C-alpha cells in the first residue's frame, strides 16, 4: 500500500521524532563520558601544572579504556534508532574512537542538548493559548494586552519548532557522516576486509568452476562416451556376424566403425582436458605420469608430495603441466622434458623444463598468457625463463594449506 504524502506544512517534521530521540540518547551517552572528564576538576581542580597534566592524562586513559564500551553503545544507538550499521573496528580501541568520544561526540551531544531545549521552549511557546487558561484569572487580567503578546509568542514558538526540526535532521546527518569513519574500521582495515571478501569470493568461483568441470567430465564419461563405445562394439560385431553383406554395405560399416573410434578418442581428449578422472581418483603423480606417457618425446616426472593439495590447486597444477608440455611439443623442438612437483611449506612448486631452442614469449600467443591467468586465479605466481637457444623453464608457485 502506498504511503500517503504528508501535508506540505508538516513535511519538515517528517522523521523529526526519530532524529530527536536519536540525539537524546546520544546526549545521555556522552554525558557519562563528560562526567568522567569533569571529576578531576571538581572542588576547584588541580592548581599546579604537573597536577593538571596528570589529571588530563588520567582522563585520557579512562576514556581510552572505556572506548570499546562507549563505541558499542554508540553503534547500538545508530543501529536501533537509524538502522545504520557501524562495523566493529579491527582492534579493541584506537585513537580515532577516542577522538570521537572526546571531541566530535561531545560537540554533537551539546548541539543535541540545545536542540532539545529549543524543542521544549518552542512547544511551550506555540501552545500558549492552551496552557494560559490554567493560570489564575487575576494573573491573566494583570497582564494588559496578553492576547497580542500570546500571538507573538505562538508565532515564535511555531518558527522555533520548524528550526528545531531542521537542526535535528542536520545534526543527525552530521553524526551519521562522522561516526562511521571514527568508530568503525579504519580505511586500511576496510580495504583489507574488502580484499579478503574479494579473495574469498574468487576462491568460491574457482571452486565452483572446478566442480562444474568435474561434473561435465563425469557426464561425458558415463554418458556420451559409453554410448559411443557401445556403438563401436555393435559395428564391430556387425562386421563379424554378417559375412554375407555386400561390399558397399561393408564399406559403410567400416567407415562408421572408424569414425566411432575416432569420436571416442576425441571425446577422451576432451574429457581429459576438462578434468581427468585419474587426477581425482589417484592424484597428481598418476595424472602427470599419464601426460608423460602420451607425450611424443621423453618426459621425466618427479612428484614429491606427502599429502594431496586441495582439488582446485591440483587441477591448476595439472593443467599447467599439460599446457606447458603441449607448448614444448609444438614450439620447442626439444629432445626431452622434465616435470618436477614438490611442496615447500604452504607452497606447491611446479617446474616444467625442456632442452629446446628457447625463445618462448608469454605475449606470443603460445598459451602461456592464459596459463598465467589460470595460476593467478588461485593467487599463484607464474614465471618463465626462456633465453634464445634454451633451455626453457616454467616455474609456478601455488598456495595450499600447510
Image: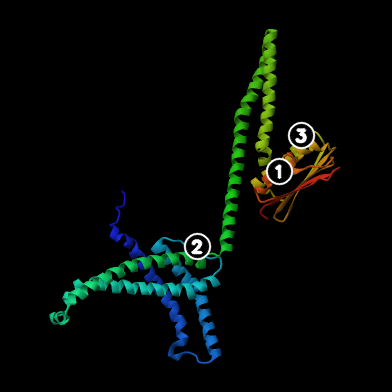
Query: Residue 383 in the image: x percent, y percent?
Result: 75, 49
Which label was assigned to residue 369?
A: 1
Residue at screen point 68% across, 9% down: 248
The numbered mark, 3 or 1, whose residue comes first in the sequence reads 3
On the picture, is 264 further left or further right than 44? right
Query: Residue 26 in the image: x percent, y percent?
Result: 41, 71
Residue at screen point 51% across, 68% down: 182
Report the coloring of the rendering: rainbow
Name above or below for residue 193 compared with residue 237: below
Q: Quadrant of residue 140?
A: bottom left
**Quarter holding the C terminus?**
bottom right
Question: Marks 3 and 1: CB-CB under 8 Å?
Answer: no
Q: Nearer the viewer, mark 3 or mark 2?
A: 2
Query: Residue 64 in the image: x percent, y percent?
Result: 52, 76
User: How many labels were placed on the picture?
Assistant: 3
Which label was assigned to residue 87?
A: 2
Front-most of 360 and 252? 360
Which label was assigned to residue 294?
A: 3
Amino acid at each position: 500500500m502506498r504511503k500517503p504524502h504528508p501535508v506540505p506544512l508538516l513535511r519538515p517534521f517528517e522523521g523529526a521524532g526519530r532524529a530527536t530521540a536519536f540525539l537524546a540518547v546520544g546526549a545521555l551517552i556522552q554525558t557519562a563520558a563528560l562526567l568522567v572528564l569533569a571529576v578531576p576538576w571538581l572542588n576547584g581542580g588541580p592548581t599546579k601544572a604537573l597536577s593538571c597534566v596528570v589529571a588530563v592524562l588520567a582522563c585520557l586513559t579512562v576514556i581510552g579504556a572505556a572506548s570499546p564500551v562507549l563505541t558499542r553503545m554508540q553503534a547500538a544507538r545508530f543501529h536501533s534508532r537509524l538502522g545504520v550499521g557501524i562495523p566493529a573496528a579491527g582492534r579493541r580501541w584506537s585513537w580515532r574512537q577516542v577522538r570521537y568520544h572526546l571531541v566530535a561526540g561531545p560537540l554533537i551531544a551539546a548541539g543535541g542538548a540545545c536542540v532539545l531545549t529549543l524543542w521544549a521552549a518552542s512547544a511551550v511557546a506555540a501552545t500558549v493559548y492552551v496552557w494560559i487558561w490554567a493560570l489564575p484569572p487575576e494573573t491573566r487580567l494583570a497582564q494588559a494586552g496578553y492576547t497580542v503578546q500570546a500571538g507573538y509568542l505562538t508565532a515564535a514558538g511555531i518558527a522555533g519548532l520548524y528550526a528545531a526540526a531542521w537542526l535535528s535532521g542536520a545534526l543527525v546527518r552530521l553524526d551519521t557522516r562522522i561516526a562511521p569513519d571514527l568508530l568503525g574500521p579504519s580505511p586500511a582495515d576496510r580495504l583489507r576486509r574488502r580484499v579478503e571478501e574479494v579473495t574469498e569470493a574468487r576462491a568460491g568461483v574457482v571452486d565452483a568452476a572446478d566442480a562444474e568441470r568435474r561434473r561435465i567430465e563425469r557426464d561425458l564419461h558415463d554418458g556420451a562416451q559409453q554410448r559411443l563405445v557401445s556403438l563401436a562394439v555393435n559395428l564391430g560385431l556387425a562386421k563379424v556376424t554378417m559375412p554375407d553383406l555386400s561390399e558397399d554395405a561393408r564399406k559403410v560399416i567400416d567407415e562408421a566403425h572408424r569414425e566411432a573410434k575416432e569420436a571416442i578418442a576425441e571425446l577422451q581428449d576432451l574429457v581429459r582436458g576438462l578434468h581427468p578422472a585419474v587426477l581425482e581418483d589417484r592424484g597428481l603423480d598418476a595424472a602427470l605420469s599419464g601426460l608423460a606417457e602420451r607425450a611424443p618425446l621423453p618426459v621425466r616426472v618427479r612428484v614429491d608430495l606427502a599429502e594431496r593439495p586441495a582439488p582446485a590447486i591440483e587441477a591448476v597444477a595439472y593443467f599447467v603441466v599439460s599446457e606447458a608440455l603441449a607448448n614444448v611439443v609444438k614450439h620447442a623442438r626439444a629432445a626431452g622434458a622434465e616435470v618436477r612437483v614438490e611442496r615447500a611449506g604452504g607452497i606447491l612448486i611446479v617446474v616444467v623444463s625442456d632442452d629446446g631452442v628457447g625463445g618462448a614469449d608469454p605475449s606470443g600467443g603460445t598459451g602461456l598468457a592464459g596459463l598465467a591467468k589460470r595460476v593467478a586465479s588461485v593467487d599463484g605466481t607464474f614465471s618463465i625463463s626462456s633465453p634464445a637457444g634454451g633451455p626453457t623453464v616454467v616455474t609456478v608457485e601455488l598456495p595450499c594449506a600447510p
